[in-house]
Image (cartoon, helix red, strand yellow):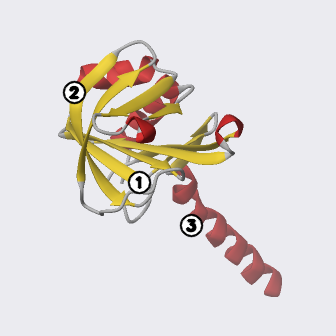
Amino acid sequence: MKKFLLAAGVLAGALSAGPVLAQQSRVGDWTIEKRTQDTHCNASRGYKDKEDENREYVIVITYSEKAIVIVMIYDGWEWDKVGEILRADVGTDDADIMKKAKWEVMDKTTVRGIFEYDQSMMDRLSKAKRLSLDFEDDDEDSIEMQIPRAGEALAALKFCEENRK
């Protein structure tokens, strides 16, 4: 009887873990996931840059049929005012995406851009190796983040979004 209960417990644990695993995947060092507290799937990537005092960079991308949301975290930033709206030109290694885009300060190291969904923006992001923000009043805080394998990560994000529960 004990063996049966143990086997049933192990099987129940394995079955309950199945959907959780189906909601998260990896593409290189990108994590694609649908977290229970989020409505949509996210693609996120974090890394440390040895050429920048080993500072940490994190990017999170999510989208729906109405919006594309990009969150950028950089531990070298020291924004003062949560909720402040900043303006920055957004670009990739080979194309400008948007001039004077609005970015909201979320905390001292985080900004968030919310953009109307635009397939051409997604296409440009998918071909990029770098994403840059060039703040109009502050070159010191302008940044360039590495986004290798973005096309694969965005394809996995699309798959996650189409299959989310």
Residue at x 38% of width, y 33% of height:
133
Nearer to us in this view, 129 or 137:
137
Q: What is the secondary structure assignment of the residue under circle 1?
A: strand
Quadrant in the picture for the C terminus: bottom left
What kind of residue is marked 2?
Answer: Asp
- Could you say which disc has been placed on residue 16 in the image? 3
- Tell me which label, 3 or 1, sits earlier in the chain: 3
Other residues around mark 2 within 10 Å, as few (<14) / some (14–19) / many (≥20): few
For marks 1 and 2, give the CA distance: 23 Å
Residue 109 position within the rendered picture, expressed as x and y whole percent measured from the top left: 45, 56
- Tell me which label, 2 or 3, sits earlier in the chain: 3
Residue 148 position (above or below residue 135): above
The residue tagged 1 is 110
The residue tagged 2 is 118
Q: Nearer the viewer, mark 2 or mark 3?
A: 2
Residue at x 47% of width, y 23% of height:
151
Residue 125 position (above or below residue 38): above
Residue 98 position within the rendered picture, expressed as x and y whole percent measured from the top left: 24, 25
- Residue 105 in the figure: left or right of residue 47: left
